[in-house]
Image: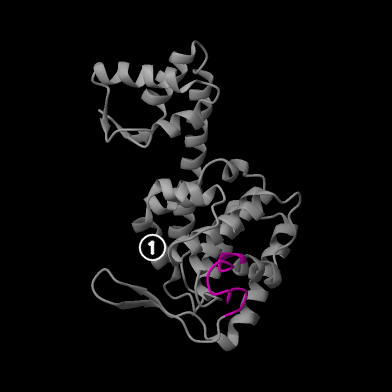
Amino acid sequence: MDSERAERIAEGAHRYRNRNEREFAGYRDAADTLMRLDSHEPLGIPFVLHLHRLLFAHTDGNGGHLKTDQNLIVSYESGRETVFVPPPPAETEFLLDELLTRYEAAKQEGRTHPILLIGTLILDFLAIHPVADGNGRLARLLTMYELVAQGYGVARYVSIEQRIFESKSSYYASLYESQRQWHEGEHRVWPWLSYLARILAGSYEDFEQRIAAADEMDGSKQDRVRNYILGQAPPVFRRRDIERAVPGISVATIRLVLNELRDRGKIKPEGSGPGARWRKL
């Protein structure tokens, strides 16, 4: 959906135009719930289904149930091709319960690095594919939850979901490589774990850059706006983005800097009025 519309829904809009917006609102609610937790309980099926219920609270309300029909993981790159067949519904509850129980036991033992544990948890979760719809979203929510629970607080400030979206080809390729021969117990976890580690490392680099940029924003109000536009703003941005990133600065000052950078050939407007977009050159 349009980024401006997505921001409004993320901020709490309650009128939705279609299913995409309703599902987006569900993800908003589930992520917000995780970020507001004061403590982190051990993972169990009831908690997973609670998150699933939140994901679909604004749609048909059928979230919160394990799958009852066989589902497939398919690729549409060259037609419709089945790339992985998850376990059947009759085995789902047992496998999911066993996975979460063993994961929590391994955490308590403390013999394995948390990132390896989280990565293998998510790999097996996606292989089990325990719900009819929303497995990927659930897996990313669980990734965020466990990262924060294990002390990787960067998940609170940098969208790991966005980094996965921007590298979705690598995401699917690494999953495919690591799920081959999963049913036989002869799969290789390292393609997926390497991908997850790169995503996490990149998230920390983003966070460090933001902190460094914030340290450089001392000085006059015009300097702060100018530094944000040239150093931090995305390639295409709006005045509203500046107002959020650099609070406490008047619209008149922001307009002054925008016009100055336009005259210097650093940016150019696309459209007019408060909703106009600006493109960095």
Residue at figure coordinates x 56%, y 55% from the top left:
28
272 sits to left or right of 106:
left
Report if residue 221 lies within the magenta region. Answer: no
As drawn, 280 above or below 114: above
153 sits to left or right of 214:
right
User: Could you say which is closer to the camera, residue 141 or residue 234?
Assistant: 234
Residue 53 in picture, x, y percent from top left = 62, 69
The image quadrant that residue 19 belongs to is bottom left
What amino acid type is highlighted by mark number 1? Tyr
Residue 51 in picture, x, y percent from top left = 63, 65
The image quadrant that residue 85 belongs to is bottom left
Residue at figure coordinates x 51%, y 32% from the top left:
244
Mark 1 falls on what kind of element? Answer: helix
As drawn, 42 above or below 243: below
Predominant secondary structure in magenta? loop
Residue reaching furthest top? 220
User: Could you say which is closer to the camera, residue 79 or residue 54?
Assistant: 54
Residue under pointer 1: 172
Quadrant position of the N terminus in the picture: bottom left
Report if residue 62 lies within the magenta region. Answer: yes
| Colour pattern of the rendering | one colour
Residue 43 in picture, x, y percent from top left = 70, 64
The answer to whether one can see residue 146 in this image is: no
Q: Which span of residues is magenta-colored? A: 54-66
Dot 1, how many residues are within 10 Å of its Cα: few (below 14), some (14-19), or many (20+)?
some
